[in-house]
Image (cartoon, rainbow, N blue to C red):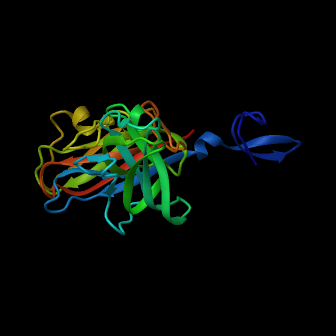
Amino acid sequence: VLADGSNWNPGSGAGFYGFRDSTWKLLESQASTLSRVKSYSFKSFAASSGTRYIAGFYELVSADLNLDQGSTTGTMGGANAPYAAHAILVAGGPGVASGGTGGVGVITVSGTSVTDEGVRTTSDSEVIVSDTTAMTTDQYFETTLKWLGQVTYTLSQNGNRTTFDADFNVGFVKYEDWGNQDFTINTFEVVGLAGANDASFDISLCTHSADNWTYDAASFTFPANIIVSMATVHSTESDLDNKIPFAFKDVSLSVSITGSADQPTTTVPNGYLIQIVTGANGSVQFLDAHVSGTIN
């Protein structure tokens, strides 16, 4: 049987026990059974230099949405695309709600949702901002639902306001959370083979959180909440040389990820991604990345 070590501790802490000779004996400690390694692969193709992600993705729209009482909807995503990702919003500041006697702006995301259990729901919706007048510049919002295909952001108001508006950026995010579990990352390792010379290459392990997002009316992009970066650690010895292998490893990490959280905060990340930056087309012939840690 499994003991959690707190509600029931047969004598040696959390772990698996068997009953023999009138006593409970530890068969295997819980710590050893809850270690995990997740692995990911990447290859850069022709005309593919730039910033890419594995273990998740950021799919963002560069230009912001400017909604008001005369134009209340905007869209994100391509029809029938299998994103299965959270919709996000980064505010350009507080929205206006005036005229009439009361009410505030509300932003709702609608479309086809899908759960981690594989339940697909058409015509679903979720309020992503319940009061646009309380939004602050660069504030991050994320739906708990995941979406398929194109979604619609709708600005409405919950009173009798005659004038209301909101400016904000939108996108989809997908991140690794080890099956909605809380865990601690302790190791990041990379090994690969270069397919071209590249003096701009870098690979980083990044947290997904609500921190460091910046609203931009024309050039919205993702934050780099970097845990560890090869270019930072290796410094000048981080260039790729054609047909030469490369590697990176850091076993000194101790990063807590609250994967059970429906949404991240500015201080509590609920997932991670691996960011790969290439400056030359086809510079990564192949790359394998491994993230190790323990379930909390």
Can residue 209 be seen here? The reply is: no
Pick the front one: 62 or 156: 156
Residue at point 23%, 33% (across, down): 232
Residue 207 place in picture, x, y as percent: 38, 39
Pick the front one: 208 or 293: 208
Can residue 6 be seen here? The reply is: yes
Residue 21 place in picture, x, y as percent: 87, 44
Residue 86 place in picture, x, y as percent: 42, 52
Q: How many marks?
A: 0
Q: From this viewpoint, which residue is outermost toward the front? A: 100
Q: Is residue 210 left or right of residue 14?
A: left
> From the viewer's perspective, is residue 192 above or below residue 255?
below
Q: From this viewpoint, which residue is outermost toward the bottom? A: 80
Q: Is residue 89 left or right of residue 125?
A: left
- The image quadrant where one finds the C terminus is top right
Residue 204 picture quarter: top left
Residue 161 picture quarter: top left
Pick the front one: 187 or 125: 125
Q: Is residue 296 left or right of residue 80?
A: right
Residue at point 77%, 41% (across, down): 25
Q: From this viewpoint, which residue is outermost toward the right? A: 22
Residue at point 51%, 66% (across, down): 120
Residue 254 place in picture, x, y as percent: 45, 32
Pick the front one: 171 or 111: 111
